[in-house]
Image (cartoon, grey):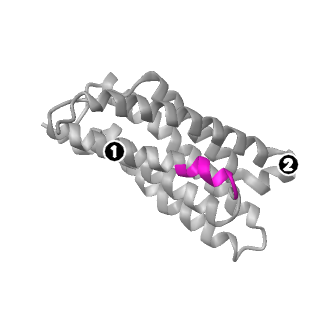
Amino acid sequence: MRSTAYSLPNLLTYARIVCVPLVVLCFFVEGSLRSPDYARWTSLVIFVIASITDYFDGYLARAWKQTSTIGRMLDPIADKLLVAAVLLLLAADGTIAGWTLWAAIVILCREILVSGLREYLAELKVSVPVTRLAKWKTTIQMVAIGILLAGPAGDKLIPGVTAVGIACLWAAAIVTLYTGYDYFRAGLRHIED
């Protein structure tokens, strides 16, 4: 019997993890290029590909009955690595700054809180299913981050791209707060003194 560690859904998850350093590399290369816009567009393409694998790895794993322990473990980790790395890059290069940093902080704090809560509940053999709203949160978040990756390069094509990305990031942060509270409230029922 073939190992599920190398099933297509898991390979897609591994690919998403590999995309993280590639997006980071684009930002480091950006300063050394004559056209920094090229690096932004490249990072956006890599991010979009990674985001698409997020949908397909779960869908294919369920459709082909290839769900695995490693897939369940790595899928949320891959998502969090991608989101955290890109938010930090966008903050470092000034695409998100000032009050908008709070939206990024809310998103990152929620991800850490939910990860810790899931780990604790897993020890108690309690499963916390992903809600439909949490899936929408991820979609809004990925769209916001994608728009912000285009950032200044996108503004040259369509003025206001960065502003739209910032508005989407705030929308993602609001939904993130709600879903984080929802998970925390569900988890509180199982927390012992």
| Quadrant of the drawing holding the N terminus | top left
Counting from the top left corner in percent of width and height, residue 140 is at 59, 34
Task: Residue type at mark 1: give it.
Answer: Ser
- Count the marks: how many? 2
Give whichever of 116, 139 is nearer the camera: 116
Q: Relative to 56, say whether 91 is above or below.
A: below
- Name, please, the residue furthest toward the bottom: 32
128 on left or right of 137: left
6 on left or right of 192: right
10 Å crowding of disc 2: few (<14), some (14-19), many (20+): few
Residue name at image x 87 percent, y 46 percent:
159
Counting from the top left corner in percent of width and height, residue 46 is at 57, 52
Counting from the top left corner in percent of width and height, residue 183 is at 37, 31
**Nearer to us: label 1 or label 2:** 1
Task: Residue type at mark 2: give it.
Answer: Leu
Counting from the top left corner in percent of width and height, residue 93 is at 67, 65
- Asked if the magenta segment contains residue 100, the reply would be yes
- Asked if the magenta segment contains residue 154, the reply would be no
Q: Which mark is residue 115?
A: 1
Give whichever of 115, 29 is nearer the camera: 115
138 on left or right of 30: left
- For the record, the magenta segment spans 98-105
Q: Is residue 25 visible?
A: yes
| Quadrant of the drawing holding the C terminus | top left
Distance from Cα at disc 1 to Cα at disc 2: 38 Å
- Name, please, the residue furthest toward the left: 1
